[in-house]
Image (spheres, rainbow, N blue to C red):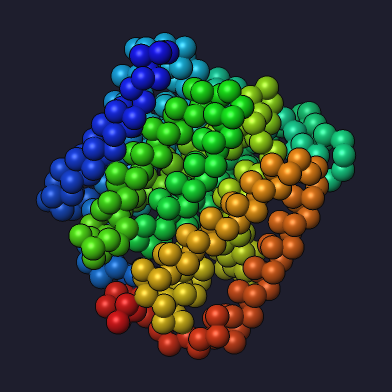
Amino acid sequence: MNLLSNNIGLILLITFVMSVGITWAFIPLALKWNWVDLPNTRKVHEQATPVVGGVAIYIALSVAFLATCWLMPAWFQEFSWLWLGALLLLATGVVDDSHHLSPPLRFLLQICVCLIMIKPGGVVLSNFGTLFSSQVQDLGLLSVPVTLFAALGVINAFNMIDGMDGLSCSILIIAMSGMTAFAIHGGQFGSAWVLLLTLVSVAGFLMFNARFPWNPKARAFLGNSGSLLLGFVLAWFFILLGNGPKQVFMPMTAVWLFAVPLLDTSTLIWTRWRQGRSVFKADNYHLHHAFLRAGFSVEATWLAITGLALMLATIGVTIELSSLPGQYSFYVFMVVAFTYYFYLRHCWASQKFLGRHFIHHDFTVEERITR
């Protein structure tokens, strides 16, 4: 443990560099193999873009984790099922990126992986904490189906928020930073280490996915392989650290750390259901689409939504640190959720967002949005 502690910074730096290097090496190969995401009427990019993020992140993360497990063998035993589940979802996403699996089949495969997390993995949501009263609400026989529902919700919410340069990775970094801090404070160093390795692996990929001076447009996407993989890792630690013997924060704090994807996805699903549309059919009514329709640039939209995610996470962390009961966190979040829903509903009806009229309706040509 001392050898690992003395070299944490170096290991994290090497992991970051590996992620950058693997992503950079895979981009030309993906273009050669036609392993790309093609533009269409609901997307904001205008050229075929490699979907190598999931594979690059998983390789960098696995190499770093397996190397450190030589020093801490117990960690491999603790997280072996996490690695297997992540690998299976990565493979599912790779096939989906290439051959477009049907939503029911993709959903069935996700259920199978989540059951691995629940049964052999032992990661189960046993209670909601003090969500509705001062008493802890144990789930009893409902723990498995509720855990399955929660994990699937996180995985698919993260997959759905991955629709714009840099957005999903930034939201993940915020959520994992919060969980890492709580894990360290609560003495869950194995979980903190896996979260840190995931965080820096994603940060390395972000160098090619977000818009920076050296990267005017995303050169690589996560793809379904990356979003399913990372959504699963998020779900695992939200549940593991949010209740049970390794609990380091209230279950509602996990909701705040992941607030933007949950608000965006739940609003979309409810709206699609009310309109009689398939909840699985993709569209261009996400939060980032509202920003872009109102004439905000991709860069401004990325910064604004990332800032919103950071603000909501900060509210949740503040409530957690204040030692207020979980029901207060729940009530405040419900106020935020209803405000978000009715404001977005008003925006789509009035064709106006943040004081700006919608001026863009076509996301096929990216320059048309950012000009």
Q: Residue most toward the front?
A: 6
Place residue 131 in its image quadrant: top right
Q: Report the residue at 60% width, 52% height from top.
A: 314
Tell me, yes or no, if residue 99 can be seen here.
Answer: no
Q: Report the residue at 29% width, 68% height from top.
A: 45
In the image, 288 versus 42, the foreground residue is 288
Left/right of residue 284 with respect to residue 145 in the rendered view: left
Instruction: Return the x and y of residue 26 as percentages of the image width and height.
Output: 18, 44
Q: Report the residue at 45% width, 46% height from top.
A: 173
In the image, 255 versus 286, the foreground residue is 255
Tell me, yes or no, if residue 214 can be seen here.
Answer: yes
What number of labels is visible?
0
Vertical placement of residue 366 versus 225, above or below: below
Vertical placement of residue 25 versus 333, above or below: above
Q: Residue most toward the right?
A: 134
Instruction: Return the x and y of residue 201 as percentages of the image width and height.
Output: 34, 39
Quarter holding the N terminus is top left
Instruction: Return the x and y of residue 138 as percentages of the image width and height.
Output: 80, 31
